[in-house]
Amino acid sequence: MLRRPGAAPVTSASVSVTTGHDAGTTPRGTAWPMLAAALAGALSLFTFAPFGAWPLQFFLLAFLFYQVGMATSVKRATLIGWAFGLGWSVAGMHWLYIAMHRFGGLAAPLAALAILLLGAYMGLFAGAAMGAAAWLRRRWSLPVAAFLMLVLPVLWGLSEWLRGWVLTGFPWAASGYAHHASPLSGFAPLVGVYGIGVLIALCGSCLAMLTQRARWPAIGLLCALLAAGYGLRAIDWTRPHGAPISVRLLQGNVAQGEKFEADYINGALALYRDLITAAPADLIATPETAIVLFPQQLPPDYLPSLAKFARDTGSSLLYGIPLADSPTRFTNSVAGIAPSGQTYRFDKQHLVPFGEFVPTGFRWFVDMMQIPLGDFHRGAQIQPPFAVKDQLVLPNVCYEDAFGEEIAAQLRDAPRPATILLNASNLAWYGESVAIPQHLQISRMRALETGRPMLRATNSGATAVIDARGNVTASLPFYGRGVLAARVQGMQGTTPYIRFGNMLFLALGALALAAAWRLGRKYRTSTAGSA
């Protein structure tokens, strides 16, 4: 069982008498719990796509919270949390090794070390959360129920939120993404992926409470959370706008090892021109950097031929291309051509560290790899959508769709909010790994949060159409060349998540912590009176 704080103030001496350990616990005493926590964190890989064992997350977090509850010091709780976060991150992001080693040319041991160091950094967020929870438990003399049901779930969610924006953020493998189709997905339009993370942790706390006497209330709360989420899925937060449009989404499957090689560039240019002009559609979209050359480097008739096709067929085109505004200012962009000849441009705003910009002090690391086009400039935070008949299409590039609050802000603050979202990606950097199905999960969560359909045009997958409820209505097989044709209905309206972003989740978390503090104060008063 988890230990309750005693009536007297908790001190190192009282802990020593109760447990036989103190803050000076030896590394040998902490090593095995840390190893178990790291292995438990690594098992989280199976909760995400393509495996989909999302209920496992409840048990993994229950195990973590139980271990943190049994920790004999703040330091021990921090180390256990860090090990859990390390295992979670390395397992969830191991595919980055492929980009660094196979395509970046980094030696295998160095690439593996880089992944381990990244996981160690990501683990700091979980470690800090668990250490803070243990500290608050002592500071506030929290009863077990308040510690498990209020403090730990909120701090877990805060750790994921911080991991998603500190130092530009890397929110991949946030726990909520595993629940795009679970009953908890009904909460997405309200509190977003990080709010779902808190609810996942609360479900884990309910399981951890099975070690306490108050088992049935915990079971009841777990069932109520799942039932409420299932019920919320029936609510239509947005409504159709205009008439559906026909779309053609292109998947060229250009090998990453050939993409930037001079001997293959002309072939890729011809491939995408042929795919674009093969048939008309209201919207034709290519993957990220489908055209790898700057416009100034293209054959003189290349873009004019696309513009002529758009004019002659009434098709609107969106194509991924790098743009150069000066000899030193480059952007990773999606350019557009309307049937009227009007052009459009969206510049990627949230760039990938080490792939699209060089963090201060890390030029030496980037120079060890051979990744082209590695120093872009950012686009504006709010950019207009592309008009396609009745619909307004807003692109996002690569992992920009992993930053839900940024997409919500573009819908909230734009003079004309988009009715359809479009992700243009190239995940061929990561080979035949879980990165593709994981990225599809992320796009599905954005559709749920915003109540907008999400189109995906990718080089090697997952090219797909996702409706406003997060369902994949059409897709192409991974790692093949093809064109996905579909009709898509745009949506308008504002979900609570669009309106408030992550502020609602943060406000509810603050209320939960305030309630925990109040319960701790009452607990101290009652135990002092009993004494």
Image (spheres, rainbow, N blue to C red):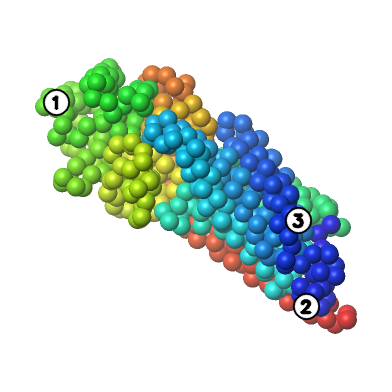
Residue 269 is at least partly visible in this image: no
- Asked which secondary structure carries label 1, the reply is loop
Quadrant location of residue 511? bottom right
Name the residue that disc number 2 marks.
Answer: 9
Q: At 27% from the left edge and 49% from the top edge, which residue is drawn? A: 377
Residue 500 percent coordinates (x, y): 47, 58
Does residue 299 appear left or right of residue 91 in this picture?
left
Quadrant location of residue 159? bottom right
Q: With respect to residue 412, does 233 lie above or below?
A: above
Name the residue that disc number 1 marks.
Answer: 299
The mark closer to the camera, 2 or 3, is: 3
Question: Alpha-carbon distance for marks 1 and 3?
Answer: 67 Å
Q: Nearer the viewer, residue 246 or 141?
A: 141
Residue 160 is at least partly visible in this image: yes
Residue 392 percent coordinates (x, y): 32, 40
Q: Quadrant of the C terminus?
A: bottom right
Other residues around mark 1 within 10 Å, as few (<14) / some (14–19) / many (≥20)? few
Amino acid type of the residue tagged 3 in the rendering = Gly
